Amino acid sequence: MIVYHFLPAEFALRALRDRRLKIARLDELHDPFEFGLAGYPDADVRNGLETMKNRLNEQYGVLCFSCIHHDPVLWSRYADDHRGVALLFEIPDDRAITVSYQPEYFDPRLDAVIRRGHFDERDASYWVSTRFASWCQEQEIRMICGLSDHFCQIDARGKKVYFESLSLESFGVDALKLIGLIRGAHCDLKSTDIASELLAVDTLLVQDTRLDRSSFQVIAGKAYPVTGERSFTTCCFRV
């Protein structure tokens, strides 16, 4: 499946150099009402579910993508007001979770969680795939990641940060296959900036964009190859 991940230019270059993408924690997601806990009528039950959600947050994270790149809202919201980029990935179909947008948060499936006393991976997959209807323009695709088998670093604030590896090689074993980069309409990254973060054996297809005034969409131009310049050295991971 082909998906797009929007991010500021600085973090895109870091992802290229370190060949990895930061995994979002469940307590960092943009929608504070995800998991439907706020809609449950009983305060004690809500508190219990919040405790279980916190446990789940220690076990799982998500990678967030969109199946579209033409919506200007995505570029404004996630790609630094069109100054950033969209990384183009191919991900396994069996790991791609299509988000469903619902008109209300409360979900009767929470009853099963309450009776069982904990979330499991099936619950995690279900709730990361459900968001409120107002977010529907994002057309989001997610991948759930078990944190125990992913690389972890401690950031400057003492918080654990997890990463999913990516590869540019078609024969690589990583779930994330980076196949392109789209520069925002106001992005000032040059081809040389991108090439300096790629290995000399890498070639990445790059596209520029323009804002179409008639359709109010972001239009990507013809792809052109950028070949890496960096020699094989130990990556200096930065958080």
Image (cartoon, rainbow, N blue to C red):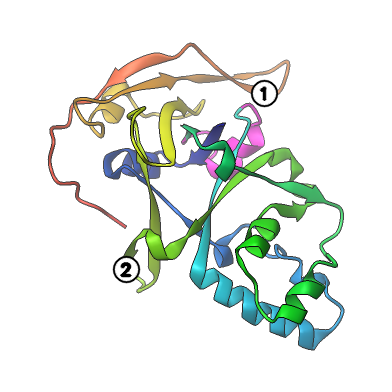
Residue hosting label 1: 217
Instruction: Locate the N terminus and report the quarter of the image it occupies.
Output: top right
Range covered by the magenta-colored residues: 70-85
Q: Nearer the viewer, residue 212 or 149?
A: 149
Give x and y (percent) for residue 139: 69, 38
- Mark 2: which secondary structure? loop
Q: Nearer the viewer, residue 223 or 214?
A: 223
Determine if the magenta segment contains residue 75: yes
Determine if the magenta segment contains residue 166: no
Q: Quadrant of residue 156?
A: bottom left
- Residue located at (38% from left, 58% from top): 150
156 sits to left or right of 181? left
The answer to whether mark 1 and mark 2 are in CB contact below 8 A is: no
Give x and y (percent) for residue 20: 35, 46
- Mark 2 Cα within 10 Å, few/some/many (few <14, many 20+)? few
Give the answer, above or below, for where 206 lies relative to 175.
Answer: above
